[in-house]
């Protein structure tokens, strides 16, 4: 059974970008571990409530096949988070799936993982991607090697399918 971490902000994550992939992964027999910046019940932008399994700082790359970042306004918490950058780099260097949806590809860009890569992002993040060496692609889902990006809530289902297929 494949294992995937889903990382999201404890407040103001984008509900559909967590709920739709999470349900899809569970339906497709993936072991999902929910990771956040607080162990308190998380509250999405649209009111979804969900309890994290672990703090994101406790993610162990050796125990999973991939990592996925959820978007939403709360995602800005992680933009400059060097601990998360290090975690993402471990997954990437070990050829494991690194996936991000909505505005969260900005985290990948700021960490240096998108340099020379094709990626998509919520339109507000396009400049950040380009300023950090990525080639912006105006598409719902973009795969470049082991990095998968998606541009927002409407792409959540296709994103989940693509992540699952690539695992």
Image: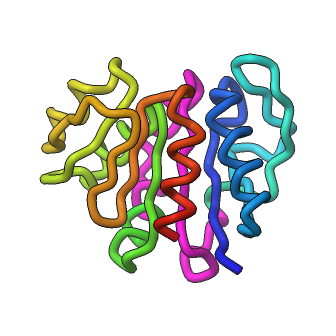
Front residue of 128/165: it is: 165
Residue at 29 percent of width and 65 percent of height: 145
Residue at 86 percent of width and 37 percent of height: 41
Res 79 quadrant in image: top left
- Residue 43 in the image: x percent, y percent? 79, 27
**Is residue 2 found left or right of 166 in the rendered image?**
right
Q: Is residue 54 above or below residue 76?
A: below
Q: Is residue 87 above or below residue 24?
A: below
Q: Is residue 74 magenta?
A: yes
Residue at 28 percent of width and 43 percent of height: 119
Quarter of the figure with the N terminus: bottom right
Res 73 quadrant in image: top right
- Residue 126 in the image: x percent, y percent? 26, 26
Q: Is residue 136 above or below residue 61?
A: above
- Residue 90 in the image: x percent, y percent? 41, 72
Q: Is residue 143 above or below residue 133?
A: below
Residue at 51 percent of width and 58 percent of height: 163
Front residue of 105/23: it is: 23
**Is residue 65 found left or right of 144 in the rendered image?**
right
| Magenta span of residues | 58-86
**Is residue 31 found left or right of 144 in the rendered image?**
right
């Amino acid at each position: 059974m494949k294992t995937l971490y889903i990382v999201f902000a404890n407040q103001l994550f984008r509900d559909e970008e967590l709920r739709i992939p999470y349900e899809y992964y569970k339906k497709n027999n993936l072991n999902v571990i929910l990771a956040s910046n607080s162990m308190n019940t998380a509250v999405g932008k649209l009111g979804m409530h969900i309890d994290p399994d672990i703090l994101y700082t406790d993610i162990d790359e050796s125990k999973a096949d991939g990592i996925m970042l959820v978007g939403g306004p709360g995602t800005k918490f992680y933009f400059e988070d060097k601990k998360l950058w290090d975690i993402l780099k471990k997954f990437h260097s070990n050829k494991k799936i690194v996936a991000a949806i909505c505005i969260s590809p900005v985290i990948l860009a700021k960490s240096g993982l998108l340099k020379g890569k094709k990626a998509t992002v919520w339109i507000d993040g396009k400049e950040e991607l380009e300023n950090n060496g990525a080639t912006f692609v105006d598409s719902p889902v973009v795969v470049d090697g082991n990095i998968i990006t998606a541009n927002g809530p409407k792409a959540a289902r296709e994103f989940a399918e693509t992540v699952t297929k690539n695992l």
